[in-house]
Amino acid sequence: MISLEGKMKRYIVVASILIVLFMTMYVLTEFKPQFLGLTIGLSFSLLSLWTTFKKAKVIGDVASGLKTYSTFSYTIAAFGVLIRIGLAILCVWLALEYPERLHLISVITGFALIYVIIMADILIESGRKR
């Protein structure tokens, strides 16, 4: 079984590859608002996933007594849900504020793309175990 840190690294690599691909398509095609929206949505979603990862790591380490963390880490863990909701609201607000630069549906799709990555990883891992 892969550790939580290993899964997070894998998600970051896959998301980074997609972000580079989206930015390349942003430069090369005329669908600039769509690809910029996908990039912004996926970036905010990756940041949201990182806050969840940080919360799980902090709570797991503190509960097992492995180590103590800084006040910043405890703050991220305590306000994780509010931070994630705030990131989603900020992402959509940016798309609504700048509709000529960001396509709203692309931003929402990009924000949901991290969940597609996680589900694909789960399916791949379950296929490997069989």
Image: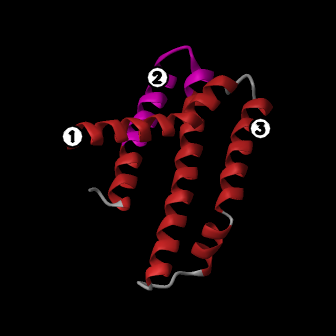
Point out the stretch of residues depicted in magenta. Answer: 14-35
Question: Contact, CB < 8 Å: mark 2 with mark 3?
Answer: no
Name the foreground residue: 72 vs 30: 72
Query: What's the image's color scheme?
Result: secondary structure
The C terminus, quarter of image: top left
Q: Is 128 placed above or below 76 here?
A: above
Q: Is residue 45 magenta?
A: no
Q: Which mark is residue 128?
A: 1
Q: Is residue 24 magenta?
A: yes
For label 2, the SS is: helix
Q: Is 14 placed above or below 37 here?
A: below
In this view of the protein, can residue 109 be seen by the observer? yes
Q: Which mark is residue 86?
A: none
Q: Amino acid at mark 3?
A: Trp
For the image, the number of numbered tags is 3
Q: Within the image, what quadrant is residue 124 found in?
A: top left
Q: Which mark is residue 25?
A: 2
For label 1, the SS is: helix
In this view of the protein, can residue 103 be seen by the observer? no
Residue drawn where x is 50% and y is 39% of the image: 115
Q: Which mark is residue 93?
A: 3
Q: Is residue 13 left or right of residue 74?
A: left
Nearer the observer, disc 2 or disc 3? 3
The N terminus, quarter of image: bottom left
